[in-house]
Structures are given as C-alpha cells and as structure tokens.
Amino acid sequence: MRKSAIAMAGLALMAAAGGAQAADLGYNRPYAAPAPAYAAYNWMGPYIGANLGYQWGDTTHAPNKPSGTVFGGQAGYNWQNGQMVYGVETDFQWSNADDVIFSSKFSNSWFGTVRGRLGYAMNNVMIYGTGGFAYGNIELEIAGLSESRSSYGWTLGAGAEVGLTPNWTAKVEYLYFDLANRTFFTGTSHGMESSLMRAGVNYKF
C-alpha cells in the first residue's frame, strides 16, 4: 500500500508539472491572427515633390527627334482602401528637349500633366498606373524665324514608389505623352510624341 501511494503521488506531481509546462509554452493562449502587412504604411493624404529626368521623342510630319533633360515639380492626393491606393496628381516640367535637322529646329521647353493614379501597395512599396491630360508647347525655328504654339493631348504611364519614412517617399516613373498637331507659319502642322523617364521625391503631409 505504501509503495502504491508513493507511486500515485509521483504520477500526480508529474501530471501537474506537465500542465504547468504546457501553460508556460502558451498552449492555452487564444489564437490571434497577424496584422495585415499593408497596415504598416499609410499612403493616404496630400503630398508635394520634385523630379528630374530625361525626355525623348518624335515630331509629327517632320524628321526631328527632340530630346533632353527635364526637371519640375508635382503635387497630389492619395486615398487608400486596404492595399488599393488611388489619387490625382498634377505636374509641371521645364525641358531643354530639341533637335536640329538642316535649317529647322523643333523644341519643347515646357509641358505639364493632370492625371489619375491607381496603385497596389505592399507595405511601404507601391506600384501604380497613371494617365490623363497633357499640355505643353511646340516651337519651330527656321532661318531666323520662330513660332511657339501651345498644344494639348493625353498621357499614359506607370511607376513605383517607396516610403522611406512616414513623410518622405521616392519614386521612378515612365510617361508617354502626345501633343496634338498645330499649324505653324510654314503652313504645315506638327505635333510631338514623347517619352519621359524620371525619378522624384515627395513629402506627405
């Protein structure tokens, strides 16, 4: 009897120790689902920034292919619903894109866009498509005579943006824009089709 009592007491102690160990390991804790990754970075709100890039393209009804560096600024607003980010952005660019063939020179010294953006956020990284309205100037110089015409058109592109801090982001972006034909003093009509690759930074408020 004495040996049986000692054995039963030992089994009881072992069972109690095992239960305590299981509780220490967290087996009795309720399951908590991990927070979604996109909750870590907030893209929503207004922003303003600057950019630098390179432009190249073609002149319609002429062999000239204006190209050159561009710089400018942009401002916009983002809304966010889960991982979907959508917003509006406007930008204005100064450009030294030009090309001279024989006696004719075509150039594009400024342009701008007003676009919508639709993106997919993965924490602090977002990829997006963008498109909308474009405007700018087309200048023709021949034999000392010149004329600059304002033109309007459309733009389409894509980019990627990364959140560096809660307020600062950096982006790379490609845009294609098409400025419609305008009639010049030569009696001919010309437009401009250009590609733009640029990098920029934004400050989110």
Image: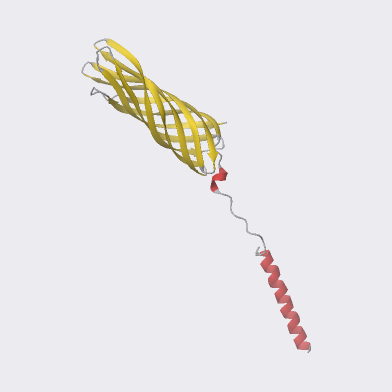
Q: Quadrant of residue 43?
A: top right
Relative side of 175 to 205, left or right:
left
Residue 146, given in percent of the width and then of the height, sits at: 29, 12
The outermost residue toward the left is 102
The image shows residue 81, relative to residue 188, as above or below, that is below
Which residue is pictured at 52% across the width and 34% down the height? Answer: 78
On-image quarter of the C terminus? top right
Which residue is pictured at 76% across the width and 80% down the height? Answer: 9
Q: Quadrant of residue 158?
A: top left
The image shows residue 131, relative to residue 24, as above or below, that is above
Q: Quadrant of residue 151?
A: top left
Q: How many marks?
A: 0
The outermost residue toward the right is 2
Residue 82, given in percent of the width and then of the height, sits at: 54, 43
Which one is nearer the viewer's eye here, 6 or 158? Answer: 158
Visible in this render: residue 174? no
The colour scheme of the drawn protein is secondary structure
Which one is nearer the viewer's eye here, 79 or 106? Answer: 79
The outermost residue toward the bottom is 1
The image shows residue 88, relative to residue 30, as above or below, that is above
Residue 1, given in percent of the width and then of the height, sits at: 78, 89
Residue 186, given in percent of the width and then of the height, sits at: 24, 13
Visible in this render: residue 48? yes
